């Protein structure tokens, strides 16, 4: 049975009360590898409470109006049904992949088409992984996403309701991408809390695509936590497409940890959502690691998107590349706070960080704060942020070549955004996102 949050009580008390009623219903009430974190997490959430913009890290993002709604919490392990035609409407054309479908955070076996995986590779629900691969889950679950200072990570850990599990054994190359289609369905406003765990062992190579869709007019709040581990000489490419409805809000927390000579790359493209907060922490805990962080946010109406990143360089001789771009129209808001942290003795670090924004409307606002915190002296680190409008001279040049003003402006925006889209190394996904980006830019100028 779902639990409904009582809006007459303060937000923190509502979740604490719901936690008491959820015992034995959620995944972590049934799985020993996961349940050990539950009590500590809810105790820490009780101490921290729901974040407010009085906290420096939440200064420009107020989630109180999102949290204070009367959501239902679907705590049972039942998987809602979805019409296959609704799935077909959102699938990426010509994408040859191992497809797994999650509905409200739970794997839907009937809609999934995982196909034949290389020996030892596992793509399943977190619940099944806890039962069938408890040693792997126990070794990694809760190791990278720390909830000591993160209330919503603590909340997810207390209420975790299943999610995606990917395991790639040592030396295994997964040729085709793993394609996770996240669908949200509900008759009433709903809050879901998926938990994902990706483990790529030494020398393993994999690509994971996550596309997030909403098949409801109800308001949705998704509080996701994902943890990723990449062993020595491993490589994980991770893509997220946030293309849910305008009535959807989400907090996504990603914590990635990778070891010697490994590569972790992530690319998040945000095209929709009422309030979206993406927390990304990458820890390259080994020598000769490469970390790549890319993000693109295209704002419209009153969207609010907040990207928070941290790259924690623990060892020497590592490289990190970070590029986030934003285009804001109407009354949309954007926030970027990125930090590169270089610890003592982490010499010969090469770290690049940049945030660039185009603001198309007087009502739109962008708040940006790139940071470097360096405690080593033999490093090459740079950071910067720019915010402005379209280059009118460039538009004039294109118009002098026969383009309409609308087409000239769209081309300028496409050129600006394409740097991020071109970092997608899966052809079908890159083509799909290019089309979605073009559609968004065209919509900016198609209004009466």
Image (spheres, rainbow, N blue to C red):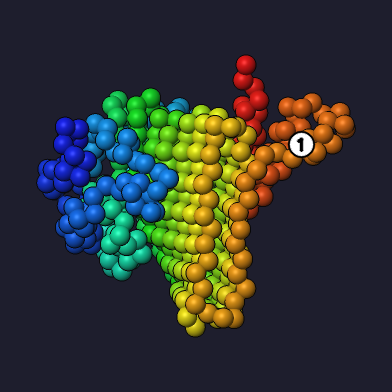
Q: In which quarter of the image is residue 71?
A: top left
Kindly identify the residue that appears in the image at 26 percent across and 35 percent down.
68
* Closest to the observer, 191 or 124: 191
Q: Name the residue under label 1.
A: 392
Does 280 sit left or right of 129 as displayed? right
Kind of element beneath mark 1? helix
Residue 162 appears in the picture as rendered? no
Is residue 311 visible in the rendered image? The answer is yes
Horizontal arrangement in the rendering, residue 191 relative to residue 297 (left or right): left
Residue positioned 19% across, 60% down in the render: 40
In the foreground, 426 or 192:
192
Task: Judge from the rendering whether residue 322 lies leftward or rightward of residue 217; answer left or right.
Answer: right
Most extreme residue toward the top is 448
Q: Residue at x 39, y 54 (%)?
A: 57
Provide residue 7's location: percent of width, then percent of height: 20, 32
**What is the quadrant of the N terminus in the image?**
top left
Q: Measured from the top left, where is residue 304 in percent x and y? A: 46, 38
In percent of width and height, residue 46 lies at 18, 52
- The C terminus lies in quadrant: top right
Query: Residue 406 in the image: x percent, y percent?
Result: 73, 27
Q: In this view, does 427 lie above or below 147?
A: above
């Amino acid at each position: 049975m779902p639990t409904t949050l009582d809006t007459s009580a303060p937000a923190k008390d509502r979740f604490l009360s719901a936690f008491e009623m959820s015992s034995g219903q959620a995944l972590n009430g049934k799985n020993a590898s996961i349940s050990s974190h539950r009590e500590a997490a809810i105790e820490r959430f009780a101490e921290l409470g729901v974040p407010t913009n009085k906290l420096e890290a939440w200064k420009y993002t107020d989630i109180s109006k999102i949290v204070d709604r009367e959501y239902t919490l679907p705590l049972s392990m039942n998987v809602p049904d979805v019409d296959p035609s609704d799935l077909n409407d959102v699938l990426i054309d010509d994408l040859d992949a191992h497809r797994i479908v999650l509905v409200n955070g739970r794997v839907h076996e009937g809609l999934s088409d995982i196909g034949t995986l290389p020996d030892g590779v596992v793509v399943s629900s977190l619940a099944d992984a806890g039962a069938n691969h408890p040693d792997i889950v126990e070794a990694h679950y809760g190791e990278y996403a720390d909830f000591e200072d993160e209330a919503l990570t603590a909340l997810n850990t207390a209420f975790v309701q299943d999610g995606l599990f990917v395991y790639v054994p040592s030396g295994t190359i997964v040729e085709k991408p793993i394609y996770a289609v996240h669908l949200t369905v509900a008759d009433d406003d709903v809050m879901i809390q998926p938990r994902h765990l990706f483990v790529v062992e030494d020398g393993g190579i994999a690509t994971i695509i996550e596309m997030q869709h909403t098949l409801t007019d109800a308001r949705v709040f998704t509080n996701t936590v994902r943890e990723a581990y990449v062993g020595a000489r491993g490589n994980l490419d991770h893509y997220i497409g946030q293309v849910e409805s305008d009535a959807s809000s989400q907090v996504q927390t990603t914590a990635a940890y990778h070891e010697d000579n490994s590569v972790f790359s992530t690319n998040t493209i945000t095209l929709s959502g009422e309030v979206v907060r993406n927390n990304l922490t990458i820890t390259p805990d080994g020598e000769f690691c490469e970390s790549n962080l890319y993000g693109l946010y295209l704002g419209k109406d009153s969207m609010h998107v907040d990207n928070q990143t941290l790259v924690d360089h623990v060892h020497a001789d590592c490289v990190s590349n970070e590029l986030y771009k934003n285009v804001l129209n109407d009354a949309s808001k954007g926030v970027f706070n990125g930090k590169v942290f270089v610890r003592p003795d982490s010499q010969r670090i090469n770290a690049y960080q940049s945030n660039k924004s185009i603001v198309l409307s007087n009502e739109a606002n962008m708040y940006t704060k790139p940071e470097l915190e360096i405690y080593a002296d033999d490093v090459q680190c740079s950071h910067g942020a720019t915010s402005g409008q379209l280059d009118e001279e460039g538009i004039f040049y294109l118009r002098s070549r026969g383009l309409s003003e609308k087409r000239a402006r769209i081309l300028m925006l496409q050129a600006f955004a394409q740097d991020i889209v071109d970092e997608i190394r899966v052809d079908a996904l890159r083509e799909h996102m290019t089309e979605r980006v073009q559609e968004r830019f065209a919509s900016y100028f198609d209004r009466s």
